[in-house]
Amino acid sequence: MRPEQVLATPLDVTNPSDVHQAIEDAVRRFGHVDVLVNNAGFGLFGALEELLEQDLRREFETNVFGALHAIRAVLPHFRARRSGHIVQVSSLEGLAPGLAAESAYAGSKFAMEGVCEGLAEELVDLGIRVTIVEPGPIRTEFGAAARVVPPAIADYDSSVGRALDAFAQLAGNQPNEPGLVARAIITAIESPEPPLRLVLGREAVQAVRGEAGPATRGARRVGEPGHHDQRGVRAPSDPDNRGRTLKRPSSEDAPSGDGPRT
């Protein structure tokens, strides 16, 4: 990617003025905005009873209100062009939380899932699409930046304590590669029928199909033909292979070309 194709700007998503300024700077630099990707957020893990209120508020100010600030700032530009795509990075925990210690984080993700479902209905006649990305564990620094509160109340040792131990063991060993997750998102954005939900990674696909029930009926892969009205669910592990962990393909399987640029 060439330098003139990139604009880096300071941005605190919890500050609406920062968000509006970043959007305006992007429009001035590039003429318009095609896609908004809401990826800012952090994890807060521990027993809900023991979490500090200031941490709970910060979790929702960042994960929920930060995303809302960005969406509200970009919508006037999208409406004016009758075109645009909002990509909300959620999590498997936004659909099917499977462990203790996730109540606060899952709550913030559930909140944005509901916002995006309703928003898709508001925007469907304006040429603006909404996609909720629901990945399983991805090998990033997310865990290192998370706020983790070990239980002080013994009653939570067997649930929250064990879950936090599992999180610690997973750090650095997450099965899904971020580059392939990015590729799947790009494929969804470029699809003529982008999904409302994009479930990524074998773990997420299996959990959603096992626990979400009717919500996943008719799930199909990115690019698979069929009617779509921004209500359906697509649950690929990558654009080509359903139900597999997102790992780097071998040289025999590697696609031609340069691949996605981020």
Image: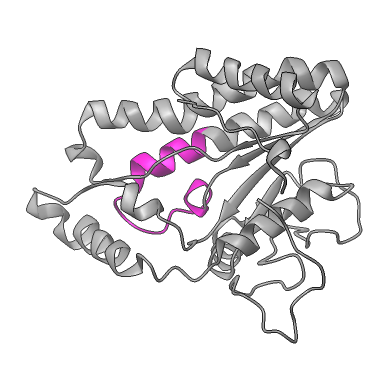
137 with respect to 206 (left or right): left
Query: What residue lies at 18% left-to-right and 62% top-to-bottom?
Result: 158
Query: What residue lies at 69% left-to-right and 27% top-to-bottom?
Result: 119
110 with respect to 70 (left or right): left
Q: Quadrant of residue 210?
A: bottom right
Query: What residue lies at 79% left-to-right and 22% top-to-bottom?
Result: 78
Q: Main secondary structure of the magenta part?
A: helix
36 with respect to 157 (left or right): right
Query: What residue lies at 16% left-to-right and 51% top-to-bottom?
Result: 150
The percent position of residue 196, horizontal first and vertical second, equals 73, 43
- Between 68 and 178, the residue placed more toward the observer is 178
Which region is colored magenta? Answer: 92-111
- Between 136 and 139, the residue placed more toward the observer is 139
Outermost front residue: 3
The percent position of residue 166, horizontal first and vertical second, equals 29, 66
Q: Does residue 259 appear anywhere in the picture?
A: yes
The percent position of residue 88, horizontal first and vertical second, equals 61, 39
Q: Would residue 122 be counted in the magenta stretch?
A: no
- Between 177 and 156, the residue placed more toward the observer is 177
Colour scheme = one colour
Q: Quadrant of residue 173?
A: bottom left
Outermost bottom residue: 252
| Rendered position, 109 above or below 200 | above
Q: Would residue 104 be counted in the magenta stretch?
A: yes
Q: Does residue 200 appear anywhere in the picture?
A: no
Q: Quadrant of residue 202?
A: bottom right
